[in-house]
Image (spheres, helix red, strand yellow):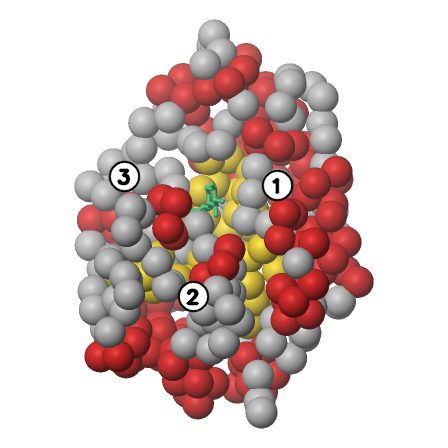
Amino acid sequence: YAQLNDLAKAAGLTYFGSATDNSELTDTEYTSILSNTSEFGQITPGNTQKWEYTEATEGTFDYTKGDVITSFAANNSQLVRCHNLIWYSQLPSWVSSGTWTNATLIAAMKAHIQSEVTHYKGQCYAWDVVNEAFDDSGNYRTSVFYETIGPEYIPIAFETAALYDPNVKLYYNDYNIEYAGVKATAALNLVKDLKARGIQIDGVGMQGHFIVGSTPSLATQSANLKSFIDLGVEVAYTELDIRFSSLPPTSTGLTTQATDYVNTVQACLDNMPGCVGVTIWDYTDKYSWVPSTFSGAGDACLWYANYTHHPAYDAVTSVL
Ligand code: XIL
């Protein structure tokens, strides 16, 4: 049968991809599907390119774990969405609890970005340069970066990333920007501001961590993608999963989940070539982050934990 990435590419997308994580790569049943380029043409490291892994001690860089993922992708000729450079979460304590001035934190940020972008130069389709900078009210999220440097930390991060890999696409990535509202407006204004200042930003990632039955409609998502594309950036769904708030799912619920997945993928298809691809935040419920993060929730992926398909899998393959 036809599979996700083959279908996505035939439809005109650049890739259909999945997040993964190091501990999963010892599971051969798991890797046999992840490495199948008919299913997945793109990989995102779910954790091990984050600051807490790559610079746990100031000035000591360790890309060993991240390299396991990028090597896996390279061995299978899969694109990599590199994730991420600047985020308020999963920081080493020397960053999150350090004693900083404006100048010293800017210097630490620049050193981190220089090292990591240089290390992965030529290996990334895109970098998520800044992740989740806004809260749900559309205000700048409190973080060591915002508290110390102010909003200027974002342009500084993009300018710095651009220096060390001329060919990588630079993305802003966030959730709850998949539909019009104050948070999407904040992200749109960020794109406008960077562009007006001549600072490189190439894309905006819609994370797409949705809930079955509360996923924005096709029309809502499609119009929202267009609002970003109209500013001259590409867009992608970067972390798609659609969870049940309580388990087990009903058969009606599984049908709703299929519709929610289809609406999201179709919104991307309707906005080609501005929308370039869809990445699911791991492909199997066996390794989804959802149960550990949202109490009682789960079954958010396209494959069940036993590697059989959700109905949503067949629905997505038929819309692609
Ligand atoms: C998640 C990982 O999947 C988990 O394993 C980890 O414990 C926390 O982070 N938004 C993001 C991702 O941008 O980096 C997050 O990944 C999920 C939410």
Q: Position of residue 165 (x, y in %)?
A: 70, 46
Residue ID at (39%, 45%): 292
**Is disc 2 surrounded by few (<14), some (14 to 19) or many (20+) residues within 10 Å?**
many
User: How far, Cα to Cα, is label 3 from label 1?
Assistant: 24 Å
Q: Amino acid at mark 3?
A: Asp
The tag earlier along the polypeptide, 1 or 2, is: 1
Q: According to the image, label 3 marks what residue? A: 135
Q: Quadrant of residue 2?
A: bottom right
The mark closer to the camera, 3 or 2, is 2
Secondary element at tag 1: loop
Residue located beneath label 2 in the image: 301
Left or right for 223, reference 37: left
Question: Mark 1 Cα within 10 Å, few/some/many (few <14, many 20+)?
Answer: many
Left or right: 17 as drawn, with respect to 310: right
- Give the residue drawn at x 70%, y 40%: 65
The amino acid type found where label 2 is placed reads Cys
Q: Which residue is mark 1?
A: 48
Q: Residue at x 51, y 55 (%)?
A: 287
Is label 1 within 8 A of ligand 1 (CB to nearest ligand atom)?
no
Residue 85 tag number: none
- The residue lying furthest to the right in this view is 75
Nearest to viewer (mark 1 / mark 2): 2
Q: Earlier in the sequence, mark 3 or mark 1?
A: 1
Task: Describe residue 251's horizontal placement relative to residue 12 as left or right.
Answer: left
Q: Regarding mark 3 in the picture, which secondary structure is present there?
A: loop
How far apart, in angstroms, are the residues tagged by discs 3 and 2? 25 Å
Quarter of the image holding residue 78? bottom right
Question: Is residue 291 something one can see in this rendering?
Answer: yes
Question: As rendered, which of 6 and 306 lies closer to the eye?
Answer: 306
Where 242 falls versus 195 (above or below)? below
Mark 1 touches mark 2? (CB < 8 Å): no
